[in-house]
Amino acid sequence: MTTYPIQLTDPRLSSPLPVAVAIHKVERLFPAHRHDFLEISLVIGGYGEEVVNGAAHPMMPGTLSLVLPFHVHELRANPGQPLRLYNCMFGVEMLRSVGEELERLKERLLEGSARRMFLQLSEAETGKLAALFEELREEYDQRRSLRSAMLKTRLTELLIRVDRLQNGGAEGQPEQERPGMPEKVWKVVSYMHNRYQEQLSLSGLANTFHMNRTYLSEELRRHTGKSFLQLLHEIRLRQACALLASTDMTICAIAYEAGYGSSQTLHKAFLKYKGTTPGEYRGSLGAEGRQLQTIPQN
């Protein structure tokens, strides 16, 4: 049998306001899965562990975790100590609402491979963040007037607090400042994150978003520091690395899932951008590095 992580979908995140907030309970195991939305969670009870892309970290009251769309993860509760946690799930497109002054925050969220994706908070920090999660949950559940505006405001505050915690309370200035990403360019970047499995091209994106091809190429490089192809490979290789680390899917199947047409194309991209092959990358993790949830193929 081959490991295929469950692909989760949530109809609430297909609405005009793609955000959902709830308190969830994990009695024993929430099996390996992935989804096309971002997820921030805060443990408020119980003990266990979370496995993200094959790497495990403990879960206990005060554990803050950020999961990105390309992450494969699962939750395991210790016997008799079920996990209770706040979950805030939101679509990539929600990042467009956080305001131009927070452009670098949006970019840092989607550059998560170099970030601390989980933190153990102090009791005081946990209390403050839990209060914000509860405000978000109440606003989400009660459907009062101006609900959309308030949810966006609370989500923005949550993202800022998480970013500050990831940076040890600092503002987290990048080494090289880049100008804020215009809305039309952000739409292209968001589209690439959501459609990386499709046959994307610079010309095709320029046509889709009614932009000049050369202008789009220059704007992507200006605001992301990468060419179109570099950005596309980065997004696809993150997904491939997550699947190599967290599943026993064949390299051919992973190539397809990550948006590459063949294992040969994935192999070439790995060599160019990672300096190794997919097989060598998987082998370097070791069997103990891949926490596999094996399920039968349909």
Image (cartoon, rainbow, N blue to C red):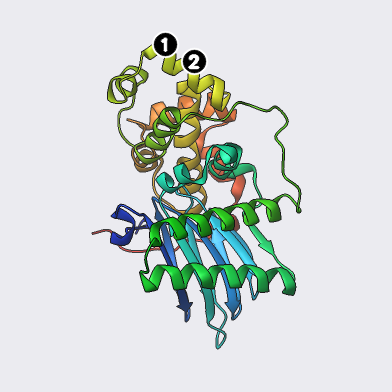
Tag shown at residue 214: 1
Q: Is residue 79 above or below residue 294?
A: below
Q: Which residue is drawn at 33% across and 24% down?
A: 205
Tag shown at residue 12: none
Q: Nearer the viewer, residue 70 or 56?
A: 70
Tag 2 secondary structure? helix
Residue behind mark 2: 218
CB atoms of marks 2 and 1 within 8 Å:
yes
Give the percent coordinates (x, y) of residue 263.
38, 32
Q: Label 2 amino acid?
A: Glu
Q: Which residue is drawn at 49% across and 19% down?
A: 219
Mark 2, Cα crowd under 10 Å, few <14 / some 14-19 / many 20+, is: some
Give the percent coordinates (x, y) of residue 123.
73, 74
Q: Label 1 amino acid?
A: Thr
Mark 1, Cα crowd under 10 Å, few <14 / some 14-19 / many 20+, is: few
Q: Can residue 281 be seen in this view?
A: yes
Q: Residue at x 40, y 44 (%)?
A: 93
Q: Can residue 3 be seen in this view?
A: no
User: Horizontally, is 175 left or right of 83 in the view?
Assistant: right
Residue farthest to the front, as pictured: 145
Tag 1 secondary structure? helix
